[in-house]
Amino acid sequence: MARNGIQYSDVQHAIDELLARGDTPSVQRIRDVLGTGSFTTISDHFRLWRSEREKNRDVPPPKGVPEVVVTMASELWREAQNVANQTLLHYREDANRQVEDAQRLAEEAKQQAANAEQRESALAEHLRHIEQRMEALNRELAASQTNERHWHQLAEASQGEAKQLKQVQQQLESQAEAQREAHHLALNEQQAAWEQRLLQEEQRHEAAEGRLMAMLDSAQQARAQEEKSFQKRLQQSDQRIEGLSQELKSKQQALHQRQLEASERDQQLSEAQQQNSVLEKQHQTLAEQLEEAQSALKHQAQRHADQETALQQAWQEKLWARMEALQQQLADLPSSLEDKQPSSKR
């Protein structure tokens, strides 16, 4: 819907003025002629004007007009419409682009307004946080001032205590000075006693040193005697070692002889083991041959038993056949005897 301010008649007069000047109507040119108005309102009125012009395009001419005039007017009208449509197509595209640009600018303005509102709300929230922080800082400042007064009172009390402690320190220093003097006198007395004791220790040390020298002389003499006895024992040990060496050589020779004998015995044992291995192989071969012979003998005995069984069975069959034949002859004997008796009577 068009907004109040620019009416349809104003837009129509502006279009007529543009057409009279030979300019193609457009939203921007209509607004330039009017000097005011929003693009949306002008675009709505301009769209309404074009729709009405499209409706009036096919209205028939009034009666009484010559046909030639009507034909020429119709042709001129069609040509004008074609030219106008081609021209309007360009301006329509231009108008559409301008409308799209205007809409895009409006959207951007809305977005900027929304961003501004968001920034405003964010700033308000930030301001609220700052106010809360200021209140907290004021409370902390008041508490700090209270603490400062408290610490100031404590400092004054500490200064009084420091004065008292300073007086006590002076008293302690005087007492310490007296104690140092007494300690110095005691040290002097103790040093004199230590010097006396040191003199006594030096005298006792000299006496001990004399005794030590005497003991050292006696120890040197004892060491000389021990060295002589050690040399004697060393000679005896050398002689004993030499005898042991001779004995060791003889034992080594005997051991070498025994090793030779052991080597010979090992060689004989190896030969005996080889012979034993050969005999074991021969025994194994003979055992295998014996097993093969036993197996062959067993097969032969089995075959002989089978043959004997077959012979016995055949003999029994023959025997049964002969017995059956004899039984048949015995059964036929009475009848043959009866046949012979009548013939003899005749």
Image (spheres, helix red, strand yellow):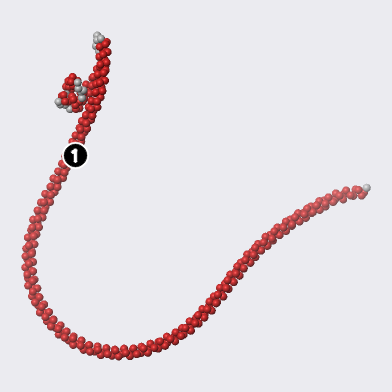
Image coords of residue 190 (percent x, y): 13, 81
Q: Secondary structure at mark 1?
A: helix
Q: Is residue 103 above or below residue 202?
A: above
Q: Is residue 52 above or below residue 100?
A: above
Residue at left 20%, top 88%?
206
Image coords of residue 28 (percent x, y): 19, 26
Image coords of residue 54 (percent x, y): 25, 19
Residue at left 76%, top 54%?
317
Instruction: Using residue 40 as the reference point, say whether residue 326 is left or right of it.
Output: right
The single residue placed furthest to the right in the displayed view is: 346
Instruction: Give the total number of marks visible in the rendering.
Output: 1
**Is residue 87 at least partly visible in the picture?**
yes
Mark 1, Cα crowd under 10 Å, few <14 / some 14-19 / many 20+, is few
Residue at left 19%, top 36%?
112
Instruction: Using residue 107 as the reference point, say whether residue 235 is left or right of it.
Output: right
User: Residue 277's image quarter?
Assistant: bottom right
Amino acid type, label 1? Gln
Residue at left 38%, top 87%?
234
The residue tagged 1 is 118
User: Residue 183's image quarter?
Assistant: bottom left
The single residue placed furthest to the top in the displayed view is: 64
Q: Nearer the viewer, residue 82 or 222?
A: 82
Q: Nearer the viewer, residue 210 or 197?
A: 210
Instruction: Using residue 315 as the reference point, say whether residue 293 is left or right of it.
Output: left
Instruction: Using residue 255 as the reference point, say whether residue 343 is left or right of it.
Output: right
Q: Nearer the viewer, residue 314 or 255?
A: 255
